[in-house]
Image: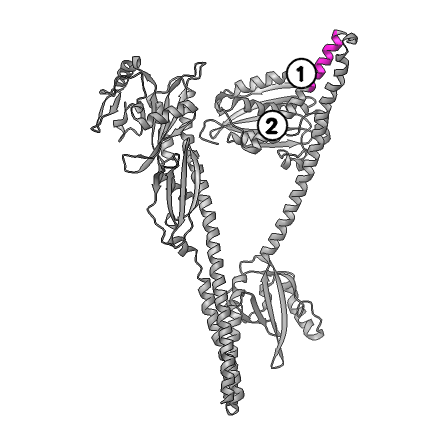
Amino acid sequence: MPIRRQQSWVLWLILLSGISLTVIAFRFSISWEKRSQQLIFQHRVDGIVATLNKELAINIEVLLSLNSLFQSSQHVDRGEFEIYTKSKLARFDTIQALEWAPRIRDDERAGHERQARNEGFENYVITQGSRAGTMVAADKRAEYYPVYYVEPLIGNEIVIGFDLASNSSRKAVMQQATASGEVRATTGIQLLQGDQGILIAAPLFSQDESGQLRGFNLGVYRIARIVSKVFELSHIDPAEFSMKIWDSTVSENPTILYSNDVESQVAEAPTYTASLAVAGRTWRIDLTPTDRFIADGGTGGPWVILVAGLLMSLLLTQYVRVLRYREAKVRYLVEQRTQELALSERTTNMIVDSAVTAVITIDKHGSVRRFNPAAEEIFGYAGDEVVGHNVKMLMPEPYHSEHDSYLQNYQQTRNAKIIGIGREVSGRRKDGTVFPMLLSVGEARVDSDPIYVGTVLDITLQKEAEHSLIHAKNLAERSNRQKSEFLNMMSHELRTPLTVILGYLPLLKKAEALPPSETVAAIAADMDASGQHLLALINDLLDLSKIEAGSMRLHREMISAREVTDSVMSKLEPSAEKKGLELVNRTADELMYADPLRLQQILINLIGNAIKFTQHGTIQVGSELIDGFVQLTVADTGSGIAAEDLPVIFDKFSQIDSSSTRNLGGSGLGLAITKQLVQLHGGEISVTSQLGKGSQFVFTIPVNGGTG
C-alpha cells in the first residue's frame, strides 16, 4: 500500500535522526562529565599537597620551638622538658616522640653517666646497638650523642642512653644538620608500632661567641597519621585516591615512605605527581583517582540524556505515525483525534514538567493553574501549596498589592506592562527571601477564557556577578589612584633630600672658598639628615618588598617589653623634647616571643608618628597581658584621624592626608609595614581615634612560640 510505504521511510528517518542526535548528546555529556571530574580531581589533589606541606611545616615548627626553649634557658631539666613536650604531644598526635641528645665528649662520659644515675636511671650507660639486636655499652670514641630526655618515656625506655652517632643513617642526618645549621630528616624508618616514620634533627648551638654545638632536639613523626590528618583537614575521603609518598632525594633509587594500599581500578586514570622539600630531603607524592572518586563524582546525567533522548525519539516517531495514520484512515477520525489529544496532553505535561525553566500558568482571576517542578525549585513551594491560590503570593511589595488591579486593568484596556513584553522583576520565595528574576508572560485562550503562561528565570547569580564586576572595577580604580598618589609622594620625598645633598656639593668642592667651620658643620648636619631621611625611605621600600615577597624572616627570642620600650623611647626622646612633648612609659616587665629589631621597628613607627602629629601634650606607651599575648598600646594627644580614614589607615599606597604626610616627612608606608610585621609575629593591630583629641594604636605579640 503506497501510503504505508510513504509512512515507513518518513518514520524511519525521524527515528534515526532522533537516535543520532541523542547519541551525539550522550557522547558530549560523557566527555563534559569526564572533564569536570578531571578538574575536580586536580583541585582536590592541589589542596591535599598544599595541606600536607603546611602540616609538615607546623610539625617541624614544634621541634624548632623546643630549640627555642633550650636557647632561652641556661639549663632545661628533665621536668621542664617533660612539661613542655607533653603539651605539644597532646596537641600533635602526628609526633611519636620528642628527644634531647646532648653532645658528650669522651672525657665527659663518666660524669654524664653518673649524673643520669643520680636522676633515677640506675643502670644508665651510653649504649649502641649490637649485631645481635641488643643494646650494649658504646665503644670509646671522641664524642657521643646519647638520648638523655625522651617523651613519652613509657614505651621508649630502651632509647635512653642510646648514642645516635652509633647509627650511620642518624649520624649522617646529624652531620648534615650541623653543617647547614637547619633541621634535617632521615629517610623512612620503621617505628616500634610498625608504622613508617621519619626522624628530624634540629641542631642546638651555644649562644656565646664560640657557637659550639650543644646537641640535638629530635622528633619522631608518624607519616601515616600526618597523611590521615591532611585528609581530615581537606574533608576528603581517603578511599577516593591511591596515594604513595616516596623519598626521592636520591632520584635513581627512591624509597617508599607511605602507601594507603588503595589501588586504582580506573582505566587510563591520571596520576598527579608533586615534589615537596622536607627538612633537606625531597618527597614525591603520587595521587591517582580510584573507583570511589569516579563513582562519587558521576551524576548519571549522560544516561538520563540517553534514555530521555531515545524516549523522545520514539515518542516523536509515534506522534508522527499517529498523525499520518489518521490521514490514511478517515473512518477512524474521531477515535484517532481522541488518542491524538490525549497523547498531546501527555507530551505537553511532560515537556512542561521536565523544562529547566520555571513555568506558571494562571487564569483570568490570577489563580495558579500550573506550577512545574522548576518553579517549585526556584520558589521553594510544592505545587499543591500554590495551585488554586492567587499568584501574588509569589510577589513582594509593591507587586503584591498592585497585581489584582493590574490584571483587571489589562483585561479591560489591553494596556500591557508585562504580558507579551517581559521584564526584570522581583520574586518572593517561601522562606520570605526576595530575589531578582526575568519574567515573560504570554497569553492564550481556552474556550474563550484567557490563560496566562509565565516563564521565570532566576537571575540571582547574574546579578551577583554584575555586582562583583562593578566592585572589582572600583577596587582596581581605587588601587590605581592610590599607586599614582604614592608615586607622586615618593618622587617628592626622594627628590627633596637629594636636592639638599647635591645643592651643597658644589660649595664643598671649592677648597679655596670653603665657608667657616661652623657653616661647614651645619651643612654636614643638613646633608646627614637628608641622607638619613633618604636611607629611611629606601629601607621602608625594601622592607615592604621583602614582606610582599614572603622573604622577611623573624629571629625571635624571649624579650622584655619594658626593655624594648625603654630602648626605643630613649632614641626618640630628643625628637619629643624639641616639640615639648612628654614621653611616658607605663609598660610592665612582661616577656614575649618576638624579633627584637622588628619589634623596635614597630614601636619606632608608632611612637615616631605620634611625635610627628602631636603638637603638645603627652605620648604614653603601656602594656597588658591578655590570653597568652602581650598587648602594647601607644596613645597620643595629637590631631587624631577622621573616622572615614580609619578603615584604610594600614593600606599600602593609601595616605589619609598626602599634604600633611609630605610636610612632616616619611614614606607613608610605615603603618602598612607595621601591620605586616605584627601579623608575621602572629599578632593583630588596631586603631581608635577622635579628631582633634588624639589616637590610640593597640597591637599584640605572643608570649611564646605557640602562636603565629
Element type where label 2 sits in the image: helix
Residue 529 within the segment the image draws in magenta: yes
**Where does residue 374 sit, x and y in percent of width and height?**
53, 65
Which residues fall within the magenta stretch? 517-530
In the drawing, does residue 168 fall left or right of residue 326?
A: left
**Where does residue 48 sit, x and y in percent of width and height?**
43, 43
**Along the polypeptide, which appears first: circle 1 or circle 2?**
2
Task: Give the main secondary structure of the magenta stretch.
Answer: helix
Q: Quadrant of residue 129?
A: top left
Res 73 seen here: yes
Is 339 placed above or below 520 here? below
Instruction: Find out whether the residues at labels 1 and 2 contact each other: C-beta distance under 8 Å.
Output: no
Element type where label 1 sits in the image: helix
Residue 404 within the segment the image draws in magenta: no
Which residue is most to the right? 513
Nearer to us: label 1 or label 2: 2
Q: Nearer the viewer, residue 44 or 451?
A: 44
**Where does residue 31 sit, x and y in percent of width and height?**
48, 59
Q: Nearer the viewer, residue 497 or 120?
A: 497
Res 609 seen here: no
Is 22 placed above or below 148 here? below
Identify the residue shown where x is 69% and y is 67%.
417
Here the colouring is one colour
Q: Which residue is mark 1?
A: 577
Q: Which residue is mark 2?
A: 542
Graded by Cα atoms within 10 Å as few (under 14), some (14 to 19) or many (20 or more), the crowding at tag 1 reads few
